Image (spheres, rainbow, N blue to C red):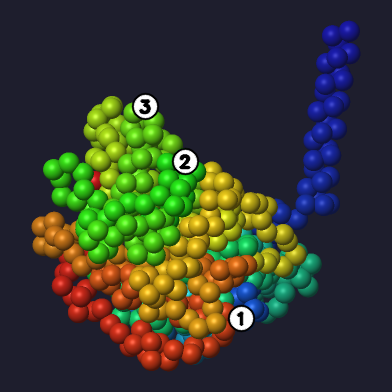
Amino acid sequence: MRKALLYLLVILTGILFIGRLFYLQIYDDSFKLQSESNAYKRIKVYPERGHIYDRNGQLLVANQPSYDLMVIPRKVKPFDSLMLCELLSISKQDLIKKLEKARHYSPRLPSLVVGQMSKIEYASLQEKIRKFEGFYIQKRSTRDYQTTIGANVLGYIAEVTPQKVKENPYYQSGDLYGKSGVEKSYEEILRGVKGVKYLQKDKFNRDIGSYKQGALDTMPINGNDIKITIDAKLQEYGEALMVNKRGGIVAIEPSSGEILALVSAPSYNPGLLVGRQRSKNFTKLYLDTIARPLYDRGLQAQYPPGSPFKLLNALIGLEEGVINTTGRVTCRNGFHYGAKKPLGCHCSYGASNDLNKAIFASCNAYFGSTYKKIIDKYPNATIGLKHWSDHAKSFGLGNFLNNDLSVGSKGRIPDDKFYERWYGKNRVYSTFTISNAIGQGEVLTTPIQLANMTAAIANKGYYFTPHIIKEIKGEKIAKKYTTKRVTTISKEHFAPVIQGMFDVYEQPGGTGYRSRVKGIEICGKTGTAEVKGKINGVTTQLTDHSIFVAFAPKDNPKIALAVFVEHGYWGGRWAAPMASLMIEKYLKGKITRTDLETRMLTGSLQEEYDKYISGEPFTINK
């Protein structure tokens, strides 16, 4: 039995060897290709990246031909380095560094030497490339921006990092990939799939045609086109309004969560990050630590929300049953509590305000009282704070929105755990945290979060996750962008708050009265947020931020937005007029208040910013 088993094992082993030899000799060309490697060249064929369109079909990003000089280090033979440097317009030191980097990456795989050469540079080099064995020219496409707007939205492509190459086998050194914006969020959809082409070479290392008549070639698959939710005309208008100002404007369609405009100021022309000057231009933008044009203020900047946050406290107060629409609070120039400095207010002394008037007149006394009632409703402040923060977080505040944008910040809605970490258990009471009543204190929000909160109010209690993708050719967008997110506030409580927002514009005492638009029913809320920063290392009270949130029309709203203007004095000075212009532009397609438009377009806050030489004009977190 053992003897038979031994014979069987020998026979099976022989069959395996014979089968493997047969496959290698008859079917597998890999070893033959290796032996013939001096006669052919294997190059990657790059696909065209998908085009990017705005929501109305306007082409924003296309492609243009580009040429890269590649090198395979082990195939390099002695060459005239000075000639090559002259052809490439680079120094010999730069060339040496690039070749050392290529050898370090891989002596056998191609690496980028100089990317995105112009047609003229390509033509000059192509005539003499045969003199530089081991080098070859790789044709690919790079981005061609059909617009000067939306740099923070569209993003840019750049050379892959060594870490990216290690993490993802699709990429090789010298490849380009989406580094920010839509280019990054939808990289796998936009990039396509690379192909391979084999070229026959002669004894002078010149290409003389396809190897084996292209039998081994594989065609690249171009990337998918996408349509984004941005309205290019509205985006362009928002960026024009924010010239010589810093801050962000985010506009959302409440019925879908689609982002209509995502403005960050100051911005830059996306075309600066294309071509041979890309690295130089990027460095200049990156090192501008004062204006910070690469910093997306609409998504990343965390500001105290100011008075727009009173809308949320009104809704929480109604839901918790501690206020109603008829109850009144007498304002004596602010909310007074103990011996501490009161929350100052601009209401006339002795004004008796109900919910409606408290909203359109922005009464601090009313909302200080409301916040205190919410927290004190429960056995202790810890429990009260938890309930309060849970309500606020249901509007998408205090956390990432789980959207398809490449960057973002969490903001902050302080809860019981936050205060326990800072001050210990049972040491926090309602008046200690009273600044939360008016959107100051420990509360921080990003412009997109505040715009989303406004959309949830417009929808009377729900929102869709804000997103930038509208359509992917041949695919469906993710289900999470079409799923309702319901807040903890009952629907019936929204009507009186919305009426108060409407009266912000319509009542003579409303804080947005001067910015109303004939023929459009706008609901809004101004905000003026105190802010501290460092100047020469000293904590200093800075000029307030100007804030405004709004949606329109009042019934069946089509747009909700938040406007933040850093150090813009007060909400009605810059943010409210700009918000009303954005709404009119989107809903009417034209502006009727041309004098206001001119003032907003030509107005500048640069002198204000020049005061803050430290480059830290943001809130100091506690």
Q: Which mark is residue 59?
A: 1
What is the three-letter code of the residue carrying label 2?
A: Gly
Residue 573 located left or right of residue 121: left
* Extreme-top residue of the structure: 1
Name the residue beneath numbered marker 3.
Answer: 379
- Above or below for 344 versus 519: above
Name the residue beneath numbered marker 2.
Answer: 321
Q: Residue at the spot x=28%, y=27% of the render?
A: 426
User: The N terminus lies in which quarter of the figure?
Assistant: top right
What is the three-letter code of the residue carrying label 1?
A: Leu
Q: Please state which of residues 11 and 177 is positioned toward the viewer in this rendering.
A: 177
* Residue 497 at least partly seen: yes
Q: Residue at the spot x=20%, y=75% of the render?
A: 608
What is the three-letter code of the residue carrying label 3?
A: Pro
* Residue 163 at least partly seen: no
Cα–Cα span, label 1 and label 2: 51 Å
Q: Please state which of residues 11 and 438 is positioned toward the viewer in this rendering.
A: 438
The disc, 1 or 3, on the residue closer to the chain's N-terminal end is 1
Residue 211 is situated, as x and y percent measured from the top left of the image, at 73, 71
Are the residues at dot 3 and dot 2 in contact (C-beta closer than 8 Å)?
A: no
Q: Secondary structure at mark 3?
A: loop
Residue 117 is situated, as x and y percent measured from the top left of the image, at 48, 81
Q: Residue at the spot x=86%, y=14% of the render?
A: 5
